[in-house]
Image: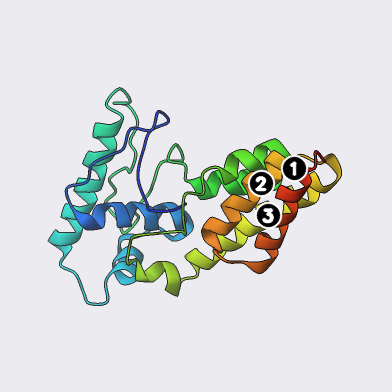
């Protein structure tokens, strides 16, 4: 959650040869239920894109994924099909997936770990028009804020100011200047300085 990147579990980042390749992967990962070539083309381009151009982008995306994880030769990250389908392996997991999983079985520890993945506003530094048009940005911000307020509710009784502080910081990354979060941050700092 922030600038879209593809990285392995060790933090190594993939390098894409085409600018649209990372965007395609981001779109596919957030639209698994309707991930087709035609839907991707309609969402990502406001004009009809040549089939050869789209195929080049898909190939570059697949190449970057394979290069990032060369030891997983048997894994087909985005299998080729002879149809409109554009599948993505369930082994590709997004920050958003991890956040939703934490929200399903909420604990302070799990939620805070998921909120640590919030680096910036969703899709920061990009111009992915589809993300705003289809509501992806809004849905991600809502999920982040839900997790933030869950942590704050849970830590009210426990007094865990560190967890509360981390949650507030994550919330302010997606909702900078939010008056309720700023008020809670000030309160958390005051409680911390008084040893509460």
Horizontal side, residue 141 vs residue 40: left or right: right
Q: Where is residue 194 drawn, in percent x and y?
A: 80, 43
How would you rate the neighbour count of disc 3 (Cα within 10 Å): few for under 14, some for 14-19, many for 20 or more? many
Q: Along the line of sight, which residue is nearer the eye, 99 or 40?
A: 99
**Image quarter of the C terminus:** top right
Q: Which mark is residue 185?
A: 3
- Which callout, 2 or 1, points at the residue further toward the start of the chain? 2
The residue tagged 2 is 165
Residue at x-position 31% and y-position 42%: 79
Residue at x-position 69% and y-position 36%: 109
Q: Where is residue 39 drawn, in percent x and y?
A: 35, 66
Q: Are the residues flagged by discs 2 and 3 in contact, CB closer than 8 Å? A: yes
Q: Is residue 73 above or below residue 46?
A: above
Q: CA distance from mark 2 to mark 1?
A: 10 Å
Horizontal side, residue 76 vs residue 94: left or right: left
The residue tagged 1 is 192
How would you rate the neighbour count of disc 1 (Cα within 10 Å): few for under 14, some for 14-19, many for 20 or more? some
Residue at x-position 31% and y-position 66%: 38
Q: Is residue 188 above or below residue 71?
A: below
Residue at x-position 13% and y-position 60%: 52
- Which callout, 3 or 1, points at the residue further toward the start of the chain? 3
Q: Nearer the viewer, mark 2 or mark 1?
A: 1
How would you rate the neighbour count of disc 2 (Cα within 10 Å): few for under 14, some for 14-19, many for 20 or more? many
Which SS class for mark 2? helix
Q: Is residue 140 visible?
A: no
Q: Where is residue 99 drawn, in percent x and y?
A: 59, 47
Q: Is residue 173 visible?
A: yes
Q: Are the residues flagged by discs 2 and 1 in contact, CB closer than 8 Å? A: yes
């Amino acid at each position: 959650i922030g600038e879209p990147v593809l990285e392995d579990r060790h933090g190594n980042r993939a390098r894409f040869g085409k600018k649209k390749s990372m965007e395609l992967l981001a779109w596919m990962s957030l639209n698994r239920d309707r991930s087709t070539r035609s839907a991707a083309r309609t969402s990502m381009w406001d004009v009809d894109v040549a089939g050869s151009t789209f195929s080049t982008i898909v190939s570059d995306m697949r190449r970057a994924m394979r290069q990032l994880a060369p030891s997983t030769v048997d894994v087909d990250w985005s299998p080729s099909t002879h149809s409109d389908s554009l599948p993505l392996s369930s082994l590709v997991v997004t920050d958003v997936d991890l956040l939703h999983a934490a929200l399903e079985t909420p604990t302070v520890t799990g939620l805070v770990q998921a909120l640590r993945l919030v680096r910036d506003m969703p899709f920061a530094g990009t111009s992915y028009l589809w993300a705003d048009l289809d509501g992806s940005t809004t849905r991600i911000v809502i999920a982040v804020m839900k997790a933030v307020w869950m942590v704050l509710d849970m830590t009210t009784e426990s007094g865990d100011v560190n967890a509360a502080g981390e949650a507030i910081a994550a919330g302010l990354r997606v909702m900078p200047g939010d008056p309720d979060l700023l008020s809670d941050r000030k309160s958390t700092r005051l409680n911390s300085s008084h040893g509460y």
